[in-house]
Amino acid sequence: MSDQPIVQIDALSKSYPVTAGRRIEILKGIELTLTDGDSLAVVGASGIGKSTLLQILGTLDRPDSGRMFFRGIDVFKLNHDRLAKFRNQSVGFVFQFHHLLAEFTAIENVMMPVLISGEHRDQAHVKAIQILERVGLGHRLEHRVTDLSGGEQQRVALARALILRPALLLADEPTGNLDKSTGRQIHKLLLELNQEMQMTIVIVTHNPDLAALMARRITIVDGALVELN
């Protein structure tokens, strides 16, 4: 771990065009600090900017102004290739819909980030087995995505996000597509992995039970972050 914050956001703003010559401000000069092992829930009504914040944290979108540092590195100053490498190795993503490759098996889906990073297929295979066993799917390695339940599919998506042991895990409504019982199992697993791996986790959610498990909760009011804890 580092003494530096894992993420430091300074005076970051983001807007989108809505009509010719008119823009709507989603984020207005926000400040945010995340440390190793931090857990943060972003809550509130739809349309306030929660997913926009998550996409900027994951460098899938860029701010209009302001800066975001990852362990002291101004990530939006990286060139395209270095930014893609940063995203692959340092950030894991989990979404409401699993976005798995349906024609591939669980283990093939989970191996993908390792292969993209340039590691040998044998290494990717070993790492995929290990993380799938950790999320409780050691018995489903060779099953195709279409043969898995919704909860199992989301566990595969979580394994894929964590296989490279990213320092930052970003989740957008990770249990929004699951029944309550299965959702609670995923909540428990997310909390366990946050503690075991000391990764920083940021979750956008409407689920109060999941939000309550996080150490911090924030919402967005008129484009500004508001701490709820």
Image (spheres, rainbow, N blue to C red):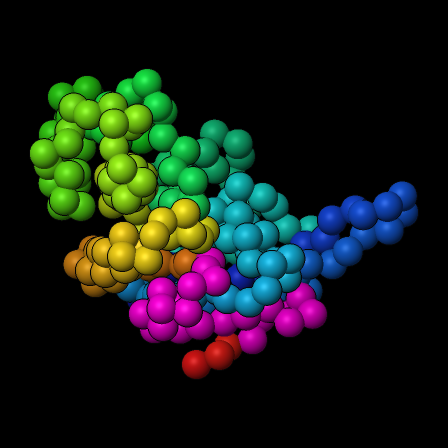
> In terms of depth relative to the viewer, which is nearer, 123 or 50?
50
Residue 86 showing in the rendered view: no
Q: Which residues are magenta?
A: 204-226
**Residue shown at 48% from the left, 62% from the top:** 206
4 left or right, relative to 221: left
Farthest-out residue, bottom:
229
199 left or right, relative to 95: left
2 left or right, relative to 120: right
224 left or right, relative to 202: right
**Residue shown at 50% from the left, 71% from the top:** 218
Is residue 220 covered in magenta? yes
Q: In this figure, what is the number of numbered marks? A: 0
Is residue 57 covered in magenta? no
**Residue shown at 38% from the left, 38% from the top:** 98
> In terms of depth relative to the viewer, which is nearer, 136 or 171?
136
Image quarter where the C terminus lies is bottom left
Residue 222 % position (x, y)? 69, 70
Residue 14 showing in the rendered view: yes
Residue 200 vertical placement versus 62 (above, below) = below
Image quarter where the N terminus lies is bottom left
Residue 34 % position (x, y)? 41, 65
Q: Quadrant of residue 20?
A: top right
Residue 147 % position (x, y)? 25, 27
Residue 121 % position (x, y)? 19, 20
> In terms of depth relative to the viewer, which is nearer, 62 or 140?
140
Q: Quadrant of residue 31?
A: bottom right
**Residue shown at 31% from the left, 40% from the top:** 150
